[in-house]
Each structure stands twice: as C-alpha cells, then as structure tokens.
Amino acid sequence: MNDDDESPSYQVSPELALLIARANDLLIRLDAWLPPAPRRVDWRTTLACRWRRRMGQGALAPVGILNCPPWAALTGIDEQKATLDRNIRQFLKGLPANNVLLAGSRGCGKSSLVKALLPRYARKGLRLVEVDRDDLMDLPDITERLAGQPGRFILFADDLSFEPGDAAYKPLKAALDGSVAGLPDNVLICATSNRRHLMPEFFAENEATQHLGGEVRPGESTEEKVSLSDRFGLVLSFYPFNQDDYLAIVAGWVAALGGDAGEAMRREALQWAIQRGGRSGRVAQQFARDWVGRRGLGGKR
C-alpha cells in the first residue's frame, strides 16, 4: 500500500481532550435541567388537558383523573343548564355559538356545570382544556395548538378576577373579540367568575360618570371593565338558593351518592348550612358527602 492511500491521522492534545470531556459533561448536566419536549396529545383517548408552564415553556398536560359531576346531579339551576346545553349543542354541530361567562354567587354550580359537559358530550367529540388565570397570556399559543385538531374544545378559565392595573385580561379580551386573529372554529371559551364584570368596581368611579341632559355617560374606567364581560356572547347569572332549592339539591346529591333522604337529613342539612354561613350547591354537596359517609360507617357521628 502506498503512503498516498493511507488516511491521515490526527493527534488530539491532552488539553483539548480534557476540554471536550468537560464540555460533554456540562451538556449532560444542562440537559437534565431543560424541560422535556412537549408530547403530542392523542385527543382520541384524551378528554381533558391543563395548560402547564415549566421553565418558561408551556405544554398541554393530559388529566388522568377527571373531576366531572354527573349532569343530572346539578339541580336548582335548570334554566342555566338548558341555555348552556343548547349553546354547546350548536357548537358541537358546527353551528354559530357564543363564548360563555358564568357569573354570580360562589358555590352555586358555575364550575360544575362546565365540567359536567365533558362526560355528557365526550362521545360527540367534546374536549376540555383548563387554563389558569396567570397563563392567559399564552392564549394565542394554546389556540394555535388546538386549531385543526380532531374534536371541539372548551377553553375553561375558572374563577376569573382581575385587579386594577392587571394586564392579564388583555389576551382574553383580544381572543374573545378584538384581535385580527380570531378563535379557531373548534374552540369555545367558557369562563366563571364571582364578579359580573370580572374586575372590582369602586364608588369613586361613579364620580367620573357624566350626565348630559338625560344621557348618562360612564367614565372610562367603568367602560373598560364592562367591555371585557360584554365580549362574552352568552352570560349566565347564578344566585343564592332559597331553603327549598337548597334541600332539593341536598337530596339530589344524597341520592347520587347512594344514600337515603329523610326528615333527619333535612334538619341536619339546614344546621350544616347555618354553620357554613350560607346555602349553596357546594355546601349541599359537602353535607351530602358527610351524611352518606357517616351512614356508611354505621353511625351518626
């Protein structure tokens, strides 16, 4: 073999070899700190996801254990149920439908009503993505990932409220109506809040209201707050329950949990509501769990 046929050999200095080894070790350590590449969600088998951020990167995280109440167990809010159900059926059929704001008294079934839609219509392609208030800045990224995916998606923002000077509401405002990039056809926003206008209202803001003749012109701060809630095409209001409605809700939850209702249950349910400071669907469900659980142990206490 001629010398010309021999491949050239390269000698690596000990200093260069040490530098390469250290660089490889550094890369291995950095790799452990980097977030994993986002996994592709199989929406054929995944019913719900939560948007999660890790080290500045957002991803859809599938929900393993669903917390969705039975549709039939939600009583005392029949009008709200019927209206929301109709809007969702329009959405599932590809017909025009409105984004939804469920607002009003705490514990009256706002969140439960949205979550109950999932098992009710999962076989018809309904899916749910929950987004925390602090992650609303990522709405454009979330909707971009859902566009073109199989199924129809509810973007669920629970217990929304914004403080003065809080800019987190702006992406939501733009997504609802105001951005040149609209929501994909397969995405609908459902939000819940204890505040009708999603922001605190102050008495001083009324002083900015102008009265010109018989015309009333609200101040700019009031207009800004109202403009956010007004971008929801459908607003469902929830109010505290009276005693009869509360007891009916208790009975419904007791039956759903496999328990028996009776006069003793009614008396204790009313005492429970007094101790908790109000009658609501949440208080009714909590009492029903306690009542049925205690009966399952074979005692009252």
Image (cartoon, rainbow, N blue to C red):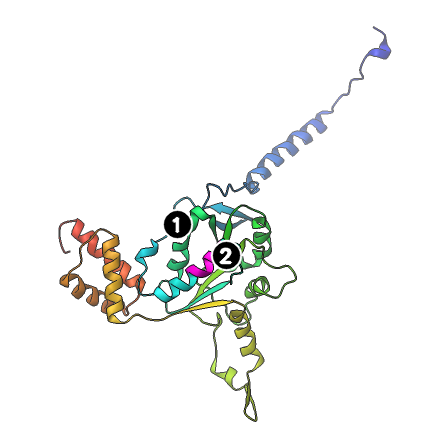
At x 27% / y 62%, what residue is drawn?
A: 249
Q: Position of residue 276 (x, y in %)?
A: 26, 66
Q: Which residue is mark 1?
A: 119
Report the side of 184 relative to 64 (left or right).
Answer: right
Q: Nearer the viewer, residue 278 or 164?
A: 278
Above or below, 45 relative to 277 = above
For disc 1, the neighbor class at 10 Å (few under 14, some 14 to 19, many from 20) is: some
* Image quarter of the C terminus: bottom left
Q: Which residue is mark 2?
A: 91
Q: Which mark is residue 71?
A: none
* Displayed quadrant of residue 173: bottom right
Q: Nearer the viewer, residue 82 or 60?
A: 82
Magenta stretch: residue 86 in it?
yes
Q: Nearer the viewer, residue 105 or 186?
A: 186
Q: Amino acid at mark 1?
A: Pro
Report the side of 136 relative to 81 (left or right).
Answer: right
The stretch of residues the image draws in magenta is 85-92
At x 60% / y 51%, what residue is drawn?
A: 144
Q: Amino acid at mark 2?
A: Phe
At x 39% / y 63%, what residue is drawn?
A: 82
Q: Is residue 131 visible?
A: no
Q: Give the residue at the far top of this rendering.
A: 1
Q: Position of residue 15 (x, y in %)?
A: 71, 28
